[in-house]
Amino acid sequence: MGKLVVLKFGEGSFEQGFAVTLQIGEEHERATTEITGKLPSFPEMPLYYSHWQSSYRQIGNRYRLHADQMQVTNVSMIQDCENTSHILRARFNTWLRAEEFRPLREKWLERLSSTEEVRVILQTENNQLQLLPWHLWDLLERYPKAEIALSSPSYDRIHKPRTPNQLVNILAIVGNSQGIDTQADQALLQQCSNAKVSFLVEPQRKELTDHLWGKNWDILFFAGHSSSNKNGESGRIYLNKTDSLTIGELKYALQKAIENGLQLAIFNSCDGLGLARELADLQIPQMIVMREPVPDQVAKEFLRYFLEGFANGKSLYQAVRQARERLQGLEDRFPCATWLPMICQNPAQIPPTWDELRSTKTEDIPNLALSDKRRFTITLLSSLAITALVCGVRWLGLVESPEMQAFDQMMRSRPMEVLDSRLLIITIDDDDLVTQRKNGESLIGASISEKSLNKLLAKLNQYQPRAIGLDIYRDYKAKDKDLITRLQKTQNLIGVCKGSDGTVNIPGIKPPPEIPTTNLGFSDFIHDRDGVMRRHILFMNQEATSLCPAPYAFSLELASLYLRPSGIQPKFTPQGNLQLGKTIFPNLKSHTGGYQNIDGIGQILLNYRSSKEIAQHVKLTQFLSSTINPSAIKDKIVLIGVTAKGDSPDTWPTPYGTALDEQMPGVLVQAHMVSQILSAVQDGRPLLRVWSLWVGVVWIWGWSLVGGVLAWRKLSFPWLVLAISITSSVLYIVCFGLLISGAWVPFIPSALSLVATVALMSIYNSKTKVRVANRE
C-alpha cells in the first residue's frame, strides 16, 4: 500500500509568505502525521515563472491552441526558454529550502521511504502557486514513485455508487483540429484493451450534451484546441470551426456524467488549468490537463505513453509520471515538454486503476473482454495450433512449390560475386559448328570434330592445366590415331558418361572408350518436380546394368584432381558424408528445407556462384586460332562443353531462368558445381544448409507469435494490413540475409503462420467485441 501526502497552503501571498500544513498517512486511511510550517515571502517568484512562460510561448511549436497563434520555432528562442527554465528551477528550489520550511522537509524525509509509491496532493486556491513546476522540487525528485497533483481546498465526494461497466467506457471528443493531428489520438484510444470508445468528431453542442447525459462514462477525453482566460479561472474548448464552450456552459451535462460515475477527464489540449478549476467545482474525481500550450507532437506522445502504462496495470499517478518523464526525449525540439502534464485531484476520491474502472462481478456477467493473461494464453494456443497446421501441410509437400519459387527469387537477388579464377571454360557455340563444317571437318552427330579435339588437347597440354574436363559425350571409338593416343595418355583429362535409370527407362550413355575408367565422371543432373536444377549429385551407386561405371560426379573428379597436389583426397565420414580436407558435404535428408520426401543420398544443395559469368570463357574457334596467355591455363581447370542451341542443345532450367532462352548450358552448370566444391574447401565459402526439423518448427512458431502480437494490438484494418506488410518484409529480409550467409530457412511457412495467426486472432477479437456489445 502506498502513502498519501497532502500539502495545504493557507492564507498568504508571495509578498507575505504562506502557512503550510503537511499531512502524511497510508493510502485509504486518515493521516497519521501532521506538521505545520511556513514558506517565506518571495515576491519575485511569479516574475520568474512569467519570464519562463513568455519565452516558452514565443516558441510556438504547433500548439494545440488557436492556429493563428502559432509561430516559427528558432534556435535562439529554444535556448532562451531553456535558460529561463533553469533560472526558474533554481529559484524555486532555493525558496523551498528556506529555514522556515525546513521542519516539513525533515518530517517528509523521516516518514517516507524512497521505495514507496507516494501520491502527493497540493491544496491551494492561489493560482500562481498552482502554476509553479512542483514536479521539479528536489525533494520530490528523490522519490521515483512519487507524483504530485493539484487540488482546491474545498471539495466534496459524490456518494452515489457508480454503475460498473464491463468495459472501460470512453467518450472521446475530437474538437476543432485545425493545424494539428488528432487522428493519432483516435488511433491510440482504439488500441486500448478492455475499452469501448465512442468518438464525437467536431460535434455540435446538443450532440455533446446528449452523449454526456446518455451513458455511464468512465473517462472523458478531449483532443483539439482549448485555452484559459488570463486569470486562469475558466477555460474554453473549441468543438468545431465555429463553436466553442466553457465548462460552465456544459455544467448540467457534466454534473450528470459525474453522478453516473465519470472518474477521469483528460484534456490533451492547451492551457488546461482554467478547465480544471471549473471542473473541480463540479467535484470530478480526477483530471489530467496541460499546464501551458502543448505542442501537437508532445500531446500525441504523452497520450501514447500514458495509455500504455495505465491500461497495462500502472496506477494513474505512476502512469502520468512515467509518460511525463518519457517526454524528455522530445525536449531537444520541444523544451520543457516534461513540465506540461498535470494531475488535478479531488482529495475525497481514490484514483481507480484501469481494471477497477471495469466490473469484476464475473458471477453476474461473464467477463468476455480479454485480460492480458487470457489474451496471452489464447494467443499462445492459437499460434501453436497454426504452427502445427502449417508444419503438417508443409510435411505433406503442399507448400513445396511456393517455397522453391521464394528460394529462386532470393537466389537471383543475391549480390554479384567475382569470377572464379581457377576455371577456364572453352565453349562450342553455333558459330563454332559452322566453322568446323566450312573447314570440311566431319562432326557425325558430335559437337567437335576429331581434328579440332586433337588440336585443342594438344594446345592445352602445352600450357600445363591441372585438369581438363571434356563435358561432351563420345560413346564411340575415335578414328584418328593421334587423337586415340592423346585420349589414352592425357592423365589430367576427365571424360563423362551418363548413368542408367531403370525406374524411368533411361539407358544411359557409354564413356569414351579411349579414356581410362579412373578418369571418368558421371554427368547426371537431378532436377526438381518443376524441372529446375537446385541440387548437386556428388556420388551414386550405379545400377548393375548401367552403361556408365563412374561412381563420382564429373565435377567432383575435376575438383579432386585440382586439390590432389595439396594432399586432399576424397573420403567418407562414418555417417556416409563426403569429406574433402576439413570440409564435409552432408547428404540431403528426406525432409530438407522446402524439400519433402526426397532421396538425398550423395546430394547437396547447389549454391550457384551468384554472377552472370561463372569464370572466364573463350570460344573454340577463337582459342584454336589465337595466341594464348599461358597464365590463363597453367594450373587451372579447363572445362570444354557445348553452348550451341541449334544441334541437340544441352541447357537446363535453373533458379536464374526456366524459359528456353534463359536456361543455362550444361557446361556452365558443371562449372558452378566445380566452383562450389573448390570454394567450400579452399575459400570457406558456405555450402547451403538447412536447420534441423525442430529448429525450423520453433522459427515458424516464433513468427506465428509475432502475428498474435500484431492482432493483440487491435489495430484498425488499414493499419493492420500495413503492419503485416512491414513484418512480412522484415521476415523476407531476414531470410534473404541468412541465405546469403548459407542458411536456407523457411520463408513461406513462416509468412503463412504469421498471416494465419493474425487472421484467426482478428476474427476472435471481432467476435468477442460483438458478444461484449450484445451483453451491454
Image (spheres, rainbow, N blue to C red):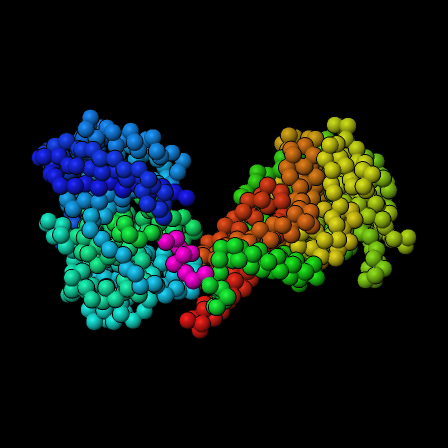
The image quadrant of residue 205 is bottom left
* Range of magenta residues: 352-360
Q: Quadrant of the N terminus?
A: top left
Main SS of the magenta segment?
loop
Give the residue at x 22% y 44%. Answer: 123
Residue nearest the viewer, comparing 562 with 739 = 739
Query: In this rendering, would 774 be left or right of 267?
Result: right
Residue nearest the viewer, comparing 238 with 458 = 238
Residue nearest the viewer, comparing 37 with 604 = 37
Give the residue at x 63% y 50%. Answer: 698
Residue nearest the viewer, comparing 666 with 181 = 181
Query: In this rendering, would 584 be left or right of 768?
Result: right
Query: In this rendering, would 388 be left or right of 235?
Result: right
**In the image, residue 686 lies at what x, y percent?**
64, 39
**In the image, residue 755 lies at what x, y percent?**
53, 60
Q: Residue furthest bottom?
A: 774
The image quadrant of residue 405 is bottom right
Judge whether 303 appears above or below 83 on screen. Answer: below
Q: Is residue 205 visible?
A: yes
The image quadrant of residue 143 is top left
Instruction: Find out whether residue 340 is within the magenta segment.
Output: no
Judge whether 359 appears above or below 96 on screen. Answer: below
**In the image, residue 526 lies at what x, y percent?**
73, 54
Give the residue at x 21% y 71%. Answer: 206
**In the image, residue 610 lies at what x, y percent?**
59, 45
Q: Is residue 406 visible?
A: no
Give the residue at x 69% y 47%. Answer: 692
